[in-house]
């Protein structure tokens, strides 16, 4: 990105519509898997999962509908987000009742 203006991490940011659309798909998939936790999973293990999801996205691009491709794209986004989270690279307020994790590499 050329000449991007740095945005303070605490500044409110309204995600653009396309980000909101994929975020909705991501959240629906995360909720369906809330019984599983990725916290504490080593980033390299999640990276292998990411490669599996990328392969699924590739197959979807070749053979499936735009909607199915978007579902697989949400999977890729979710696992990439998990990697960013377990290495402590994301700043966010913990959900109510959630255990606050110390920042650090997984
Ligand atoms: Mg998938």
Image: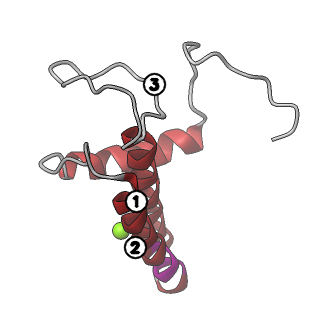
Residue 36: image location, x then y, percent: 16, 51
Q: Quadrant of the C terminus?
A: top left
Magenta stretch holds residue 45: no
* Cβ atoms under marks 1 and 2 closer than 8 Å: no
**94 is higher (above) or lower (below) than 19:** above
Q: Which residue is at a point 48% across and 61% down the rendered structure image?
A: 73
Range shown magenta: 57-61
**67 is higher (above) or lower (below) than 36:** below
Residue located farthest toward the left when viewing the structure as drawn = 35
Q: Of the numbered discs in the image, which one, if any, rests on residue 91?
A: 3
What separation in Å lies between label 3 and label 2 (alpha carbons)?
Answer: 27 Å
Secondary structure, magenta segment, majority class: helix
Residue 44: image location, x then y, percent: 40, 59
Q: Of the numbered discs in the image, which one, if any, rests on residue 77?
A: none
Q: Would you call the spot at circle 1 few (<14 residues within 10 Å), some (14-19), or many (20 or more)?
A: few
Residue 19: image location, x then y, percent: 55, 42
What separation in Å lies between label 1 and label 3 (alpha carbons)?
Answer: 21 Å
Give the mark nearest the N terminus, 3 or 2.
Answer: 2
Of 74 and 36, the residue lying toward us: 36
Residue located farthest toward the right when viewing the structure as drawn = 3
Instruction: Provide the residue designation for mark 2.
Output: 52
What separation in Å lies between label 1 and label 2 (alpha carbons)?
Answer: 13 Å
Determine whether the beta carbon of the residue marked 2 sits less than 8 angstroms from the nearest atom of ligand 1.
Answer: yes
Q: Which residue is at a point 38% across and 27% down the rendered structure image?
A: 103
Q: Of the numbered discs in the image, which one, if any, rests on residue 44?
A: 1
Q: Would you call the spot at circle 2 few (<14 residues within 10 Å), some (14-19), or many (20 or more)?
A: some
Q: Secondary structure at mark 1?
A: helix
Of 52 and 32, the residue lying toward us: 52
């Amino acid at each position: 990105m050329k000449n991007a203006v740095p945005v303070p991490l605490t500044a409110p940011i309204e995600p653009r519509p396309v980000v909101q659309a994929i975020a909705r798909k991501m959240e629906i998939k995360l909720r369906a898997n809330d019984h599983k936790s990725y916290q504490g999973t080593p980033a390299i293990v999640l990276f292998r999962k990411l490669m599996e999801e990328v392969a699924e996205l590739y197959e979807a691009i070749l053979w499936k509908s735009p909607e199915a491709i978007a579902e697989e794209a949400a999977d890729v986004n979710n696992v990439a987000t998990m990697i960013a989270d377990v290495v402590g690279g994301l700043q966010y307020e913990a959900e109510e009742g959630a255990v606050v994790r110390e920042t650090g590499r997984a």
